[in-house]
Image (tube, rainbow, N blue to C red):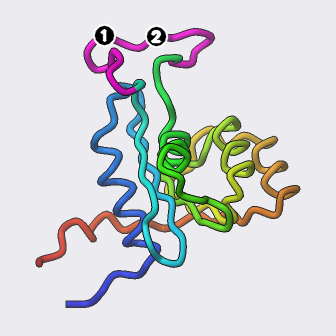
Amino acid sequence: MQRIEWDQFFMAQCFLISTRSTCTRLAVGATIVRDKRIIAGGYNGSIAGGDHCIDKGCYVIDNHCVRTIHAEMNAILQCAKFGVPTEGAEIYVTHFPCLQCTKAIIQAGIKVIYYAEDYKNHPYALELLEQAGVKVEKVNFDKSVFAMKI
């Protein structure tokens, strides 16, 4: 059996985490990594203890569900809650981050974004990432890693 590459391993974590999503529109997972170690994970869903879209439906304003916290934000907030520094870390995400998550990623000091799927890639997000010197790389994720025999 052959070991999977680091990018495939961390992206697989993102897709696994995304299965906890309570969003009915798009399941997203994020994994924050430093020195090849996972320091946090997040998926998109409601606040802890709150109503979930899968139970109550989406709460949509201006074509955005305001009930949902994005996966990237949940992962960053998990680090903040438990005092884990994100400076110099990398983030893996199933989908390209939205503009607000992009700004949070930059402010958190994360230096690299790896993502598997394009999703409404905002031109200003790309501009901000370039200004901040954050590397962005699309990962060709091979979902067959889930089918590997143990």
Q: Quadrant of the N terminus?
A: bottom left
- Tell me which amino acid carries mark 1: Lys
The reply to whether the magenta stretch includes residue 60 is yes
**What residue is drawn where x is 76% and y is 44%?**
125
- Residue drawn at 46 percent across, 73 percent down: 7
For image coordinates 59% across by 65% down, the residue present is 90
- Please state if 16 lies on the left or on the right of 39 as rendered: left
122 left or right, relative to 150? right
Residue 56: which disc? 1
> Is 10 rendered above or below residue 26?
below
For residue 129, which quarter of the picture?
Answer: bottom right
Name the foreground residue: 134 vs 8: 134
**Are the residues at dot 1 and dot 2 in contact (C-beta closer than 8 Å)?**
yes
Which residues, given as a range, are shown in magenta? 48-65
Residue farthest bottom in this picture: 1
When the figure is inspected, residue 65 is found, relative to residue 56, above or below; the finding is below
Q: Position of residue 41 (x, y in %)?
A: 42, 52
Vertical arrangement, residue 139 with respect to residue 61, above or below: below
Residue occupied by mark 2: 59
Mark 2 residue type: Tyr
Mark 1 surroundings: few (<14), some (14-19) or many (≥20) residues within 10 A = few
Instruction: Determine the CA span between mark 1 and mark 2.
Output: 9 Å
Residue lying at 69% horizontally and 65% vertically, measured from the top left: 111
